Amino acid sequence: MSVLPAARHFFRSDEGYEAARRGTVWHQLVPERYPELIVQAVDADDIVAGIRYAKANGHRVSIVSGGHSFAVNHLRDGAVLLDVSRLDHATIDADNGVAVVGPGKGGSLLMADLEAQGLFFPGGHCRGVCLGGYLLQGGYGWNSRVFGPACESVIGLDVITADGEQIHCDADNHADLYWAARGAGPGFFGVVTSFYLKLYPRPAVCGTSLYVYPWDVADEVYTWARSVSAEVDRRVEMQMLATRGLPEMGLDIPAMVCMSPAFADSEAEAEKALAVFGTCPVADRAVIRNPYMQIDLATWYDVVMTHYLGDYRYTADNMWTSASADELLPGIRTILDTMPPHPSHFLWLNWGPSPRRQDMAYSVEDEIYLALYGSWKDAVDDDKYGDWARSNMAAMSHLATGIQLADENLGRRPARFATDEAMDRLDKARDVYDPDGLFNSWMGRL
């Protein structure tokens, strides 16, 4: 038996194991999957030791950084789970516009650090999301319609391979591993200990408009949103959230919230970019209507987190699509009719058409992104609500071009998340860097 990591670790029989296992999941729907060993790594040596232990004892390896996978991809029976959330270092080189960060660094914490220095990065929208999983799966975040998915701003990585070797990869070093790291998500075959990030000047202004519509005008609102998708200024994240109630706004009615950040160089530019929301033909039916207001990222995080509550149970599923409103509306009506109570919600995002992307594993996206987040509080309702997200996305899958790994549900609904060419290239790179299949991969794939 090989030497165990010096870090704190828990076998299944150990006191503290279950707390460590559940502590890697941000919500309360913790699946009945049990790693053989959990290693709470604090440095690269702990990771290397964990890998060697797994190989010597016939275990596979999983990795968790922030635990915000809705599907909890990292919990696998019999595996060695490397918890790298304690690798949360961050060094910011403002002069050269580069940050070196650990996988356990919270995205919102990095954003605050950068803001203090007049810098910016397309970090994730939710507090608690750490950069490890977020960057590997693509990274849709703040101002990503301008800067692209965050993985496009990853310029290098420090990785520990299946052999326990510590290597640096970028466009000129281990280029195939660098290619794979930008989009492979939970299928990546290595442990990232540092990400090298390209930084940007902080936009001077963040503004938003706010329109809240009752569900009885859903057909008109979604038809309009689809019709203007190609016209929306890329500085605007045009997103609409439908839910059965908005207690944070004092509304106890089913409603659609159009509240979209716009990052610009001036108030006038932000207000002009957001004017598109006033063109909705049923804008006069909005129960709340505010064409423009200034907002900051700290407030945005507060708003977003009203829909992601740690004391609830969650499932999620999603799809990319270029389908027309007429094609999408029957499925949307069913989604609204069957939606569980708040904070469950349906997200519509106008994403594209997108510019040409870098050559990387992230290779599937489309004009419109639809995502479902089912949530409920009591385990007795698991059967009642647990299949809502999957079943509705499955029913609309004929309209999908693929899914985004951020909200994947691959264990229950395998779907396309990369092109066929990218999947073939990922498999070939895995054969080179992890020929024995040490690292657990996606829970499902096509």
Image (spheres, rainbow, N blue to C red):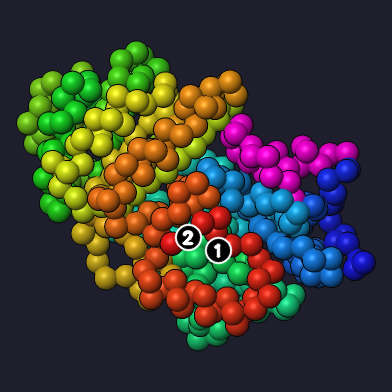
Identify the residue at image location x=28%, y=41%.
Answer: 348
Q: Nearer the viewer, residue 272 or 229?
A: 229
Q: Tell me which corner region of the image, top left, top right, bottom left or bottom right, holds residue 133.
A: bottom right
Q: Of the residues shown, which amino acid type is indicated by label 2?
A: Arg
Q: Which mark is residue 72?
A: none
Q: Residue at x 73, y 46 (%)?
A: 34
- Look at the image and say whether residue 182 sits in the magenta stretch: no
Magenta residues, start to end: 15-35
**Looking at the picture, how far across and down is residue 129, in whole percent?**
54, 46
Q: Is residue 222 left or right of residue 341?
A: left
Q: Nearer the viewer, mark 2 or mark 1?
A: 2
Name the spot of residue 69 as percent of width and height, x first: 55, 47
Q: Are marks 2 and 1 in contact (CB under 8 Å)?
A: yes
Q: Nearer the viewer, residue 143 or 33?
A: 33
In this figure, which residue is indicated by the disc labeled 2? Answer: 445
Q: Is residue 60 above or below residue 143?
A: below
Image coords of residue 369 (percent x, y): 30, 48
